[in-house]
Image: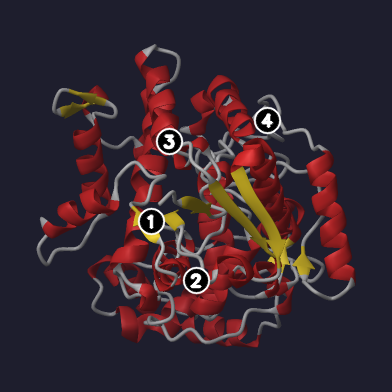
Amino acid sequence: MTHVRWIFAGQLGELFDDGGPMLLVEARSVFRRRPIHRAKAHLILSAIRHRAAELGDRVEFHQVEHYSEVVDGRDDLEVIDPTSWAARRTVRRLGARILPSRGFVTSEEEFAAWAATRGTGRLLLEDFYRDTRLRTGLLMEGQSPAGGQWNYDHDNRQRPPKNAVSLGLPDPRWPVEDDIDAGVRADLDRWQAAGEIRLVGDDGPRRFAVTGAEAQAALDDFVETRLGDFGPFEDATLTGDWTMAHSLLSVPLNLGLLDPRHVVDTVAAEYERGNAPLSSVEGFVRQIAGWRDYVWHLYWHLGEGYRTGHNTLRATVDLPREFRELDTDAIEANCLHHSIGGLREHGWTHHIQRLMVIGNWALQRGYDPVQLNDWFTDMFVDGTPWVMPANVIGMSQHADGGIVATKPYAAGGAYIDRMTDYCGGCRFDPKVRLGPDACPYTAGYWAFLDRVEPALRGNHRMAQPLAGLRGLVDREAVVQQEREREGFH
């Protein structure tokens, strides 16, 4: 039997094409499940339709309400194992021929073999990352890491340049919209007007690659113009520079348009040629071959129940309207205002805005981690069911009690003041924790520790912060102030 390969929205590149007949289904019901960022919906539809156009006569392309209209009853389908628990259940129910997953530096079998060697110990990112480098030879000199160090984090935590508006780098090479994008925009307008879907966020020009050619151009542009500055300013933020030196490759990677091994090999070659500093190259390779692969494998290793089965810190506050609607009018804290505003405008922020501004705010205020996880999945253009659980449930909100991260990523205003230019234009003072000018992050940090102290008392990494809490002379006043703080004021 000749099998027809059903490809999903995360499998749209050449890596998933072995030359045979293909099936591509655009199912409108996917966009009706929950409100979704307009830029995200646009990217998915544009990528699917561009791929259908590229494949031409070799693809069956269907635009339907439900997948079942096309795939039920067929016995000729094969599938490269898809990227969510729900999709994997569907293809197995159909009896499709299943091929091993692709699109990551480390295969599922390789990760399982590595995990089996860990015994009862934690599956630490650093251990996985080092094993990956040893196995692949990435940035290695024999059995030793290039430059003699595995990790250059200490070189990649520079503050943003003082008094700078931006890093002064050339604008990224933006894709050029075409007739397919115009058709997507018209469809989204029509579906939203009819009440068939609910879109959130701005309808800006498309900023992320949706074809293999666009993705390769974005990689080349990053290597040429921003790679050298990526490392030093990886954690820095400037109000006037929403991209900084980041690659903007998470979308095309998660759409399957780029082979991540090709990406890290390309970047590693820049160090080997003497064109880029090792600290920048290693930091980028660790993000792709380390963290990205790690959260993919944890999605399967931790099980389908991980997303909803953990709430160690008993966080039960519903996500506020300002988050759900990306409405910044009432958000006074400058850092959160700009981060949510950037998300509304682009459907994207870089990782420090996600973790230390948005996630930190949610952690301090006890937002429900499942609601927050789904919001990140729906509002971020690179959000997928496999990406977010380890990032949000684990790392950001510490809802899993330490499976992914050993301590909560909570911080006061001092961290934000050090790594961004947000605080200079804010009505709150990051050095003040009590009174009308008290920074909601600084005061919120102590109120958070007060709330979760019983749950974190046995965590040795929290011993010093909790000791500081117990010595806080105005502890009760700060906690009461934050309890009475209304919304974002």
Tag nearer the camera, 2 or 1: 1
Residue occupied by mark 1: 296
Q: SS for tag 3? A: helix
Which amino acid does the dot numbered 1 rest on?
Trp
Which of disc 1 and disc 2 is earlier in sequence?
Answer: 1
Label 3: few (<14), some (14–19) or many (≥20) C-alpha neighbours in 10 Å? many
Which amino acid does the dot numbered 4 rest on?
Pro
Which amino acid does the dot numbered 3 rest on?
Phe
Residue 204 is situated, as x and y percent measured from the top left of the image, at 81, 48
Q: Quadrant of residue 83?
A: bottom left
Q: SS for tag 1? A: helix
Which of disc 3 and disc 2 is earlier in sequence?
Answer: 3
Residue occupied by mark 4: 172
How far apart are the two marked residues, 2 and 1, measured between alpha carbons? 30 Å
Residue 127 is situated, as x and y percent measured from the top left of the image, at 21, 48
**Disc assigned to residue 284:** 3
Label 2: few (<14), some (14–19) or many (≥20) C-alpha neighbours in 10 Å? many
Report the quarter where the C terminus lies. Answer: bottom right
Residue occupied by mark 2: 445
Q: Measuring 28% from the left and 29% from the top, which residue is drawn there?
A: 138
Q: SS for tag 2? A: helix
Q: Residue furthest top?
A: 273
Tag nearer the camera, 1 or 3: 1
Tag nearer the camera, 4 or 1: 1
Q: Measuring 37% from the left and 78% from the top, which residue is drawn there?
A: 305
**Can residue 35 be seen at all in this image of the molecule?**
yes
Tag nearer the camera, 4 or 2: 4
